[in-house]
Structure formats: C-alpha cells, structure tokens
Image: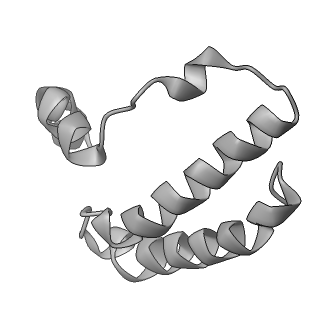
C-alpha cells in the first residue's frame, strides 16, 4: 500500500522494512525496544503530515503526541503481568 503522499512512498518502504525486521528479528525474540526504527519513523511521519496539509486534510488527532512503547510499558506493566500469569 502506498503512502498518502507520493513523495512519502520511499520513506514508507524504508520504515516498513525496518519495522518488519525489528518485529521478526527482535520483538518475537522478546526484545521490545523499538527505538531502532524511531528516526525513520519521525521523518516518515513529518512527510505524511506535510502531504496531509497539502491535500487540506485536517485531522487534529495526528497532532497528538502519542506515548512511546516504553512509556506504555510503564503505565500498563501491571496489566501485562496479569495477562502473562493467566497463560
């Protein structure tokens, strides 16, 4: 699938490749640090935001800063432990 902006397609391919590599080679082996792909994700995200502005797509939700996985892990650590103990 292509990106919303034609100029972002190559960045999307690079991020997808990075993510797929991280997921299969690290995440599935228990390494949850996803910072390896963060730099390319930020560049791709900025490209998508520019493309949306150019196309006059205004979604205020995309301006929201979402937490990183480490912040999520800290806020949901008790929930994750409960789920693991049930398995």
- The percent coordinates of residue 10 (x first, y second) are 74, 75
Q: Quadrant of residue 30?
A: bottom left
Give the quarter of the image for residue 66: top left
Q: Is residue 1 visible?
A: no
Between residue 5 and residue 74, name the one nearer to us.
5
List the single residue furthest toward the front: 54
Q: Residue furthest top?
A: 60
Q: Residue 11: image x %, image y %?
A: 66, 70
Q: Is residue 25 left or right of residue 3?
A: left
State the quadrant of the N terminus.
bottom right
Q: Nearer the viewer, residue 52 or 37?
A: 52
Q: Is 52 in front, or is 34?
A: 52
Tell me what residue is drawn at x 49 percent, y 68 percent. 40
* Residue at x 16%, y 27% (from the top left corner): 75
The residue closer to the viewer here, 77 or 42, is 42
Q: Position of residue 62 (x, y in %)?
A: 58, 28
Q: Position of residue 57 (x, y in %)?
A: 81, 25
From what the image shows, is residue 50 above or below residue 64? below
Q: Residue at x 45, y 70 (%)?
A: 23
Left or right relative to 16: residue 33: left
- Is residue 35 in view from this perspective? yes
Q: Is residue 79 left or right of residue 64?
A: left
- Quarter of the figure with the C terminus: top left
């Amino acid at each position: 699938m292509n990106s919303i902006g034609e100029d972002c397609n190559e960045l999307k391919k690079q991020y997808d490749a990075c993510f797929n590599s991280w997921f299969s080679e690290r995440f599935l082996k228990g390494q949850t640090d996803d910072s390896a792909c963060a730099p390319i994700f930020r560049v791709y995200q900025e490209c998508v935001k520019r493309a949306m502005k150019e196309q006059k797509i205004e979604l205020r939700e995309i301006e929201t800063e979402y937490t990183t996985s480490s912040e999520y892990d800290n806020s949901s650590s008790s929930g994750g432990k409960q789920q693991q103990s049930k398995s």
